[in-house]
Image (spheres, grey):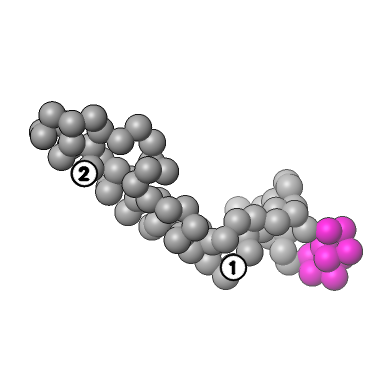
């Protein structure tokens, strides 16, 4: 994989590599809330969005890179 390149020119807004740890925490919280609700005979949460806020994650979204930017910084297309 030493010469692999991205196929689509999309990068995150911040320096964070991934949101993997944030997603793990959010899913653990969701499963915990579901188990507690079922034990108390309540309706469990329907979606993950009810439990966690995606705006608190490490990245702030993604952006498409322009051709002029890619010409200047070709290393952005490296994986």
Q: Is residue 59 visible?
A: yes
Is residue 47 left or right of 29 when viewed as pictured? right
Which dot marks residue 14? Answer: 1
Q: Nearer the viewer, residue 35 or 68?
A: 35
Q: Left or right of 2: which side holds 58?
A: left
Q: Quadrant of residue 67?
A: bottom right
Kindly report which numbered mark, 2 or 1, lies closer to the viewer in this rendering: 2
Marks 2 and 1, the one that precedes in the sequence: 1
Residue located at (59% from left, 68% from top): 14
Q: CA distance from mark 2 to mark 1?
A: 30 Å
In the image, residue 36 lies in the stretch drawn in magenta? no
Check the image and report above or below for 68 versus 42: below
Label 1 secondary element: loop
Q: Position of residue 10 (x, y in %)?
A: 70, 53
Give the crowd class for mark 2: few <14, some 14-19, many >=20 residues within 10 Å: few
Q: Position of residue 60 (x, y in %)?
A: 57, 61
Judged left or right of residue 55, residue 71 is right
Query: From the image, which quarter does the C terminus lie in?
Result: bottom right
On the image, the x and y values in percent for residue 20 come to 43, 54
Quadrant of res 2: bottom right
Q: Main secondary structure of the magenta part?
A: helix
Q: Residue 72: within the magenta?
A: yes
Q: Secondary structure at mark 2?
A: helix
- The structure residue drawn at horizontal position 38% and vertical position 36%, both measured from the top left corner, is 47
Q: Which residue is mark 2?
A: 32
Circles 2 and 1: CB atoms closer than 8 Å = no
Q: Which residue lies most toward the front here? A: 42
For this view, does 70 lie left or right of residue 16?
A: right
Provide the residue span drawn in magenta: 66-74
Instruction: Count neighbours of disc 1 (C-alpha within 10 A) and say few if under 14, some if 14 to 19, many if 20 or more.
Output: few
Q: Which mark is residue 52?
A: none
In this rendering, does residue 2 appear at all?
no
């Amino acid at each position: 994989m030493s010469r692999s390149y991205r196929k689509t020119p999309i990068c995150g807004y911040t320096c964070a590599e991934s949101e993997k740890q944030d997603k793990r925490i959010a899913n653990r919280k969701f499963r915990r809330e579901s188990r507690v609700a079922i034990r108390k005979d309540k309706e469990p949460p329907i979606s993950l969005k009810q439990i966690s806020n995606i705006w608190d994650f490490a990245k702030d979204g993604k952006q498409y890179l322009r051709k002029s930017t890619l010409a200047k910084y070709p290393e952005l297309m490296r994986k």
